[in-house]
Amino acid sequence: MIDRRMFSTALLAGAAASMISTRGIAANFTPPKARNVVLVHGLFADGSCWTEVIARLQSAGLNATSVQNPLTTLSEAVASAERVLARQNGPTVLVGHSFSGMIVTEAGMHPNVSALVYVAARAPDAGEDYTALAKAYPTPPATAGILFDGDEGRLSEEVFLRDFAGDLPEAKAKVLYAVQEPFHKALLTGKTMNAAWRSKPSYYAVSTEDRTINPDLERFMAKRMGAKTIEVKASHLSLISHPEEIARLILEATGQQA
């Protein structure tokens, strides 16, 4: 016969474990000190989009490296980040913007990674269908502006300026538009196999004026992972329009003084 007290205790323990498993490391967890930062860009951009943030990190004495995301498949994009992570000497903060939150979530399992920073970024759970998750929220305007040439996708100039880089001076936004790297359709079909935010301290910068990822979706993902969260009154490109705030959050993730 089953001991009812033992059975009830087991049920309560299981329920508690289930609640814990739905969140990542709490935001008040102090990350180990890191001198290295690896940054990954998302769609409609290249590695140079981190320039303003990198300058501030370097001024703080940090070693910063921007990954050139191939924008081909998720597995190839993760591999490109892992190669850069493997070259780092010691604890490293891994930072991702926009789509590259998928890369951070997977590549963040690398042993060199001490903390994760998401900047207006996707933050899926392991095996989660991000597209299905996003459909629970109103579709952001930039989605309608994606143009496809065969298997390659890019943003139209009008949508890039209005919905992707809406708080940047038009002249600067046009330069960024000119260097956007088209992505392959296959990139959007990938799913993460792991969720590094479940085991590593995480930080999230929500863009409150975002027209590329719904801000409420960003808030949901940040809360779910138990991330230390800031809100920036910015377009999707907060890393360019508000580099000071983004660099400060990254500095916090490194365990260094901001």
Image (cartoon, grey):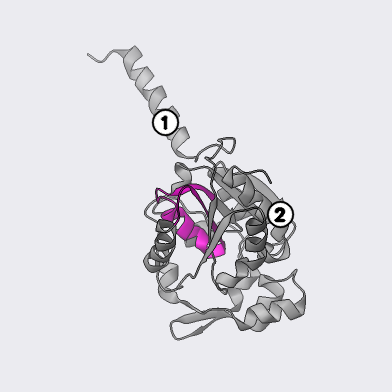
Residue sitting at x 69%, y 71%: 165
For the record, the magenta segment spans 88-116
Residue sitting at x 52%, y 40%: 32
Q: Position of residue 228 (x, y in %)?
A: 61, 43
The type of residue carrying mark 1 is Ala
| Spatial CA span between label 1 and label 2 | 35 Å
Crowd rating for badge 1 (residues with CA inside 10 Å; few <14, some 14–19, many 20+) = few
Q: Position of residue 248 (x, y in %)?
A: 68, 51
Disc 2 target residue? 245
Q: Is residue 201 above or below residue 105?
A: above
User: Residue 17: which disc?
Assistant: 1
Crowd rating for badge 2 (residues with CA inside 10 Å; few <14, some 14–19, many 20+) = some
The type of residue carrying mark 2 is Glu
Please state which of residues 222 and 131 is positioned toward the viewer in this rendering: 222
Q: Is residue 211 visible?
A: no
Q: Is residue 33 visible?
A: yes
Question: In front of the other: label 1 or label 2?
Answer: 2
Dot 1 and dot 2 residues touching (CB under 8 Å): no
For label 1, the SS is helix
Q: Position of residue 59 (x, y in %)?
A: 67, 57
